[in-house]
Amino acid sequence: MNTSNFKIELDKIDLSNTPDIPVYDDDVTSSSNNQQQQFSGFQRSFKPEKLNPTSTTSNSTTSILKNVNTHPNTHDDSESLTSENQALLEDGSDFPDGGLKAWSIVLGSFLGLIPVFGLLNSIGSIQTYISSNQLANVSGSLTGWIFSIYLCIATAGSIFSGTLFDRMGKKLPMSVGTVLFSLGLFMTAECQTVYQFILAFGVCVGLGTALNMSPLIVVVSHYFFKKRAIATGIATIGGSVGGIVFPIMLRSLYTTIGYKWAIRVLAFVCTACLVVSFVLIKERFPKDEEYKKLALSKQLTSYFTSSIDFRALKDKRFAFCVLAILFSEMSLTTALTYLPAYALAQGMTEGNSYLLVTLMNVVGIFGRFIPNLLADKYGRYNVMISTSVIATVLCLVVWLPLGKHLGALYAFAMCFSFFTSSIFSLTPVCLSQICKTNQFGARFSTMYFFVSFGNLVSVPIAGAIIGGKHVDEYNHFVVYCSIISLLGTVCWLSTRYYIVKWKFWAKV
């Protein structure tokens, strides 16, 4: 065929009727510097299709872009992730974000967290009594291990409930957790020695707390996406309510009906809250039916090997988020534990020291709600960083130089409580922003597995710094809390950097 004839034949071709070239994942994800391999892949995957007269070039472009955007290998762990583009991980339109059912879940979580977080905020009321009565002849450091073990198990043990809730739903972790929590409190009423308190309160109540903690928090994220921060904040207010009511109730009951019945009444109240919470709460995502079909030995092996997601630590966002929460909780836990003792060392009355705890729990309600409300509008990490910076400044500018003045100490306690309460309420929301909802339970548990060891060592380290309980040593303790808080702030900033890089005005 000569050139002129070829040109004529070419002009006769109707390009509008040519079929779209199908796009396959192998073609999209092939290495750009290996053209021969890519071409071979195309040859293997190409199949002639019927001519479609309505096909256009734009259809092919859309098809290509669709395949590129949805291919799992195109996702980068360091990809920017703000509140608006979290749909890269999941479709927010699938979440109710309101309605009677969703808000009843929040109510159930709220009621369950009254005993779970409320007791965490009230252990000083129990520690003070048993240190002066049943364990009056036991050293303070030994008595402190009862509550250090409780805090460690409560946080580390959540690895069990997180994965179990992801796979099996609420029934097993929450039912067993409720029984252990209630039984542990009833046994605590009968304890007389250190090892009895460790077994009853430290281990039994600690495990009950751990088994309930993850389901009560995770379930809120099943129903909320855009309003997740405010919904979680409302639920965690239950912890502040318990922190206000339980100390006042126990101090009153100790003098009227005695220690044993005071703890029993506390156990009855906690059991009632947990039972109602169990009835209201229901997971929304399907259970892992394949897991149920496995033999018991394989279930246990799979369960324990997947409870802690160490692979998630390869994601720098998650790794720095874990460090941020670890340091933030270490600072908060040590400050709350020794602030009443600090007040006594400064010459204030015992009544003043108890009032500090009450005021902190009251203000903590607003600290769990208002920052979460702002977080949905301005970004979860932005608000968390802001509150962390302010808390650090308060320690160095108010607590350290002015703590000897009662008015200044009250002001510090209330402000510090307001800005640090978001550590509990915004932590699950910040975590949910960098993982899929069906991964949240395991990652939440993994995070608190590491945080638990921080809680275990932070209080003894602070006690060693305080030493002889002189004012100067307490000032060193304040510096210790400030440094840990500063480290938490740096890690929050690092987490934000790995999400959006240097986009200072991004809502994240």
Image (tube, rainbow, N blue to C red):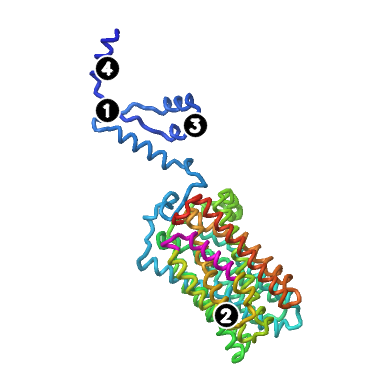
Disc with the residue nearer the chain's start (1 vs 4)? 4
Q: Residue at x 44, y 32 (%)?
A: 27
Look at the numbered disc 3 and give the secondary structure of its residue.
loop
> Where is residue 284 shown, x and y percent of the image?
42, 60
Magenta region, residue range: 375-394
Number of other residues with Cα within 10 Å of mark 3, as a class: few under 14, some 14 to 19, many 20 or more = few
For marks 2 and 4 on the same chain, the one whose residue lies earlier in the sequence = 4
Q: For this rendering, which residue is in front, 94 or 333?
A: 333
The reply to whether dot 2 and dot 1 touch (C-beta < 8 Å) is no
Q: CA distance from mark 2 to mark 1?
A: 79 Å
- Residue 233: x and y in percent read 46, 68
User: Dot 2: what SS?
Assistant: helix
Give the Cα separation between the discs numbered 1 and 4: 18 Å
Q: Nearer the viewer, mark 2 or mark 1?
A: 2
- SS assignment at label 1: loop
Looking at the image, is mark 1 or mark 3 earlier in the sequence? 3
Q: Which residue is nearer to you in this view: 420 or 87?
A: 420
Q: Amino acid at mark 4?
A: Leu
Quarter that holds the N terminus: top left
Q: Secondary structure at mark 4?
A: helix
Can residue 278 be spotted in the picture? no
Q: Amino acid at mark 3?
A: Ser
Q: Main secondary structure of the magenta part?
A: helix
**Residue lying at the far top of the rendered structure:** 2
Residue 59 included in the magenta stretch of the image = no
Residue annotated with mark 3: 31
Q: How far apart in space, not on screen, are marks 2 and 4 (Cα)?
A: 88 Å
